[in-house]
Amino acid sequence: MNIISKKKLALLLMLSLICSSLMFGQEKSSNNDIWLHYFGKNKITEKFSFSFEATMRYANGFSEKQQYFVRPSVDYQFTKSFMGSLGYSHYNTYSYGNPSLNKIAIPEDHFWIQGAFVYNHGDLKISHRLRDEFRYVGVTAMQSNGDFAIDHYEYRNRMRYMLLFNYPLIKNAETTQLFALFGDEVFMNLGSNAGKTFLNQNRIIGGVGYNFNKNHQIQLSYIHQNIWNFSNTLQESNPTVRLSYITNFDFSK
């Protein structure tokens, strides 16, 4: 065995040991999720718009509540391709699944700033979205009676990047009626209080959408959601169906 082969073998062994140590003790669970989702954009002026997003998420069919959130934002169209947003989110993540990610329902409030860059390559629409979230997450502690309760809120920073492709399947004149979408979104823990794992979530997204008209759209998507808990002791791998209703209104005219 030559020196190069020995180095490759040593590197492979080292990587195997690192991967084994990262996976040791980590439990895994899987939940079949259903997400009901709404997103509405309301154009106020030529540059400014107000958006509102809300969702209700269920685990294992509709048998367990997984999470809900509300998310308003103010958006500014810098150029035809680039939009910046400033927003707020309120979450409530329930205790669900076996094993459960949380002991009790966890509240979270955070502010965020986002940039979205959208362009076309022929018929293919390509979207890049980068969001920085400044999170205040409820932390549980056991009480004297043995029950868990929210003891305090902890600041955490998370970066999200999504790449999404949109391709028309059926057109009516120049207007797209039916389209396909595919993409991926990764959630990254950052900063001094990032937890034990760099990845917070990853979502692989695929689906179809239908435009009823310029104001109303519906999407049906499959999302494979992976979640790593803060202590990196539990990983969820969740097959998910998401039904989205999307509105787009222009009040600037």
Image (spheres, helix red, strand yellow):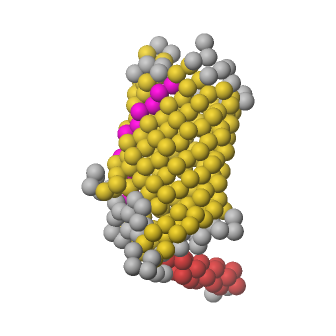
- The quarter of the image holding the C terminus is top right
Residue 30's image quarter?
Answer: bottom left
In this picture, residue 8 sits left or right of residue 78: left
Residue 250's image quarter?
Answer: top right
Outermost residue toward the right in this view:
78
Q: In this view, does 248 lie above or below 19?
A: above
* Residue 93 in sight from this viewpoint: yes
| Residue 172 in magenta stretch | no
The image shows residue 204 at horizontal and vertical percentages of 47, 51
Outermost residue toward the bottom in this view:
1
The image shows residue 248 at horizontal and vertical percentages of 51, 25
User: Which residue is found at the position 68% from the left and 29% from the top?
Assistant: 77
Q: In this view, does 183 lie above or below 227?
A: above
* Residue 198 in sight from this viewpoint: no
- The quarter of the image holding the N terminus is bottom right
Give the dominant element type of the magenta stretch: helix, strand or loop.
strand
User: Which residue is found at the position 38% from the left and 49% from the top?
Assistant: 57
User: Which residue is found at the position 44% from the left and 57% from the top?
Assistant: 93
Q: Is residue 68 above or below residue 244?
A: below
The image shows residue 63 at horizontal and vertical percentages of 27, 55
Residue 164's image quarter?
Answer: top right
| Depth order, front residue of 214/207 | 214
Q: How many labels does the image show?
A: 0
In this picture, residue 92 sits left or right of residue 86: left
The part of the chain drawn in magenta is 238-248
The image shows residue 184 at horizontal and vertical percentages of 52, 49
User: Which residue is found at the position 47% from the left and 47% from the top?
Assistant: 69
